[in-house]
Amino acid sequence: MFLQKLELQGFKSFANKTVLDFPGGIAAVVGPNGSGKSNIADAIRWLLGEREARNLRGGKNDDLIFAGTEKKARMGMATASLYFDNSSGFFPTEFKEVVISRRIDRDGDSKFFLNQSEMRMKDIVDFFAKAKLGARGLNMIGQGESDLILKSTPLERRELIEELLGLKEYLLKKNAASRELKNTFFNLEKARAQLGEIEPHLRSLRRQVSRWTKRDSLAEELRQIEDSYYSGRVRMITESLRSFDPEIEKLDKEIDRLKNEQKVLEQEFRKIEVSEPKAKKELEALRNKRRELFNKRMASSGQPAQRSKASAPAENDLKSLLKEIRELAEAALSSGLEEDPKAVLKKIVSLIEDIENAAAAEAMPVAQAVDGKLEEFNRLMDELDEEEKKHQAELDSFNKVFRESLRQVEAKKDEIEELDDQKQQLIFQKDKALFQKSELENQLRSISRKFEDFVSAAADIRLDERTAEARMMRLRAELSSMGDVDEAIVKEAEATEERHAFLSNQIADLEKASADLKTLLKDLDFKIRNEFNAALHKINGELQSFVKLMFGGGRAELKLERIRETDAAGTIGEVGSSQAEETEEIRPGIEIDVVLPKKKIKGLEVLSGGERSLLSIAILFALISISPPPFLVLDEVDAALDERNARRFGDLLKNYAKETQFVIVTHNRATMEAADVLYGVTMGDDGVSRVVSLKLS
């Protein structure tokens, strides 16, 4: 079994999904006229790649889609699928089951699928051609085409036979090679004409450019010397510049480290600074004021024993002095003095209060009270001096620590400044190197070179500096005397050379392709001719047997028609080229000679309908006996046969059903009896075709 089943949906009258299984042998499709049974054969032809709707009994592609009836709405798409068993590897694919599907919608979009992968129609046609199948070959004989091979032209007849023999694949290749050879010849002539046009101009350009040949060698020598001369200077500057940044970066890191240390020292310094004794200024002011008051007291009071008791001014001065001392002491107490000086001042205030209280209680002058307390007052003033000395010593110790911290901060600043000086020196040297680089770049720019050209240039030429400079000056002078190169001419010459080389290579490739195509055509033609002639000889042998079987005698022969020399010459002359002549071929068609028993037949036109059918069947079975196709679809080819010949036809079907599957649309009872499975097609009042199957034992 090769052809497994056919699935239809929306195709012509088969609106609903319909599946026809083909178990092998002979499947007959029967039914009344107009039921849609021939649509099954049309669907198979459509799946095999038929392009024209008229060959499927339709006017346009929309006619392939169910058009709808009063009871059934029309459909927007038609689909069909053929399932093949490929376990034998008949088809050139690795799939064990091959499914060919086709889909069309009312927008005219038609698509092919091979196992659900979309394919081009051309690829599907080629795919079937390799399997000796096609939409218009003898493996598909539609309704009204029972005598197809008889009414075809000789050349069409040959093509039908070639397809059934499996030669269509080679014919397609031959036709493609012929078209390619014609295109190759056209492109070859075009390339040769273009080459002939540019060659005179190219010779002129070559003469103009030749005088600059020496210039190129001089320029190359100059360039090599420049590479050698400048590469050393460039390398020195580059390496120098490369060395500065790491050193500067190293100094920056060291400076950052020292600044961090400086920051720590400054923090320590500020701590020491804020720890300075708070009463330093107050003690100094108190000391000065005390001395001033003591001097005033001594100056105003004189000797206590000689002071006049009635002296009012002296009494008043003393009161005023005591008041000032008291105010000064109280002000000092309210300031931030330490506890020891405060204690002394408190005693001074208390002593002054005692003097004032004593003077008031005993009604004596203040001076007398002072004299009584003066010794104690002087003692307290001495204690205050001692306290001042003690705190002065503390202050001296603080100043020593303060100066040492300040010295460390300043020393760290000096270290940083020293490193910064080194950094600035490196930056200066880097700037100097950059300036040298800039000067060298300007110098190189004047000779149309770049600094980067020499970074990796090799110093191949070993010349001392003076010799190199002299040689460069001499080469530049020679190049200058030659004048500037006309770049437009040089570019035109280069482009023309490239075009010339391209055309030359193209001509060589085309000549080789032409030779290869001619060889291929020769090989294909030899294969087709030999296989066809050999097969034709065998077919004629089988045909004699089938003619005798069908007609009870007589003979028939398929033979190549004779081509007149004038026709051949005329066909070749129309091409008009010796190259193209080789691609043209006058292919002889197939003529049919037939002699029936008891009749004088001089042409196929005089055969009756039944005789044409019998002869067509005889030729068909002669062909399939030599090259059995995997399946044949025959639509009412037995319509013109009487019962006796119909039974002969049925017997032939049974004999060849072992190698070829048959799908036959028929009305003939004898053909039905030969079938292995019957499919009855009916159409209800909704206009939809339906299938009923019956398997025959």
Image (tube, rainbow, N blue to C red):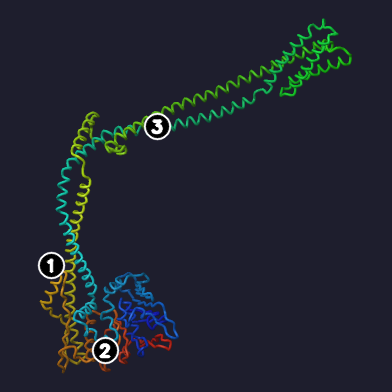
Task: Please name the amino acid that badge 3 sits on.
Answer: Phe
Q: Work out whether residue 57 or residue 23 is closer to the camera in this orientation and state it.
A: 57
Which sits in the foreground, 132 or 235? 235
- Please provide percent x and percent y for residue 694: 38, 87
Is residue 306 shown above or below 538? above
Badge 2 or badge 3: first in the primary sequence? 3
Image height of 518 relative to 455, above or below: below
- The residue tagged 1 is 578
Q: Position of residue 428 (x, y in %)?
A: 40, 28
Query: Mark 2 = which residue?
Result: 649
Depth check, mark 2 against mark 3: the one in front is: 3
Identify the secondary structure beneath mark 2: helix
Q: Quadrant of the C terminus?
A: bottom left
Q: Of marks 2 and 1, which one's residue comes earlier in the chain?
A: 1
Q: Which residue is mark 3?
A: 244
The picture quadrant where one finds residue 500 is bottom left
Spatial separation of the CA atoms under disc 2 and disc 3: 106 Å
Q: Is residue 609 left or right of residue 691?
A: left
Which type of secondary structure does the marked residue at label 1 adopt? helix
The x, y position of residue 248, in whole percent, is 43, 31
Alpha-carbon span between mark 3 and mark 1: 80 Å
- How many neighbours does mark 2 have within 10 angstroms: few (below 14), some (14-19), or many (20 or more)? many
Label 3 secondary element: helix
Residue drawn at point x = 16 percent, y = 76 percent: 587
Which residue type carries mark 2? Phe
Q: Would residue 232 be found to the left or right of residue 365 on screen?
A: left
Q: How many marks?
A: 3
Residue 173 is situated, as x and y percent measured from the top left of the image, at 23, 70
Proximity of marks 2 and 1: CB atoms separated by less than 8 Å: no
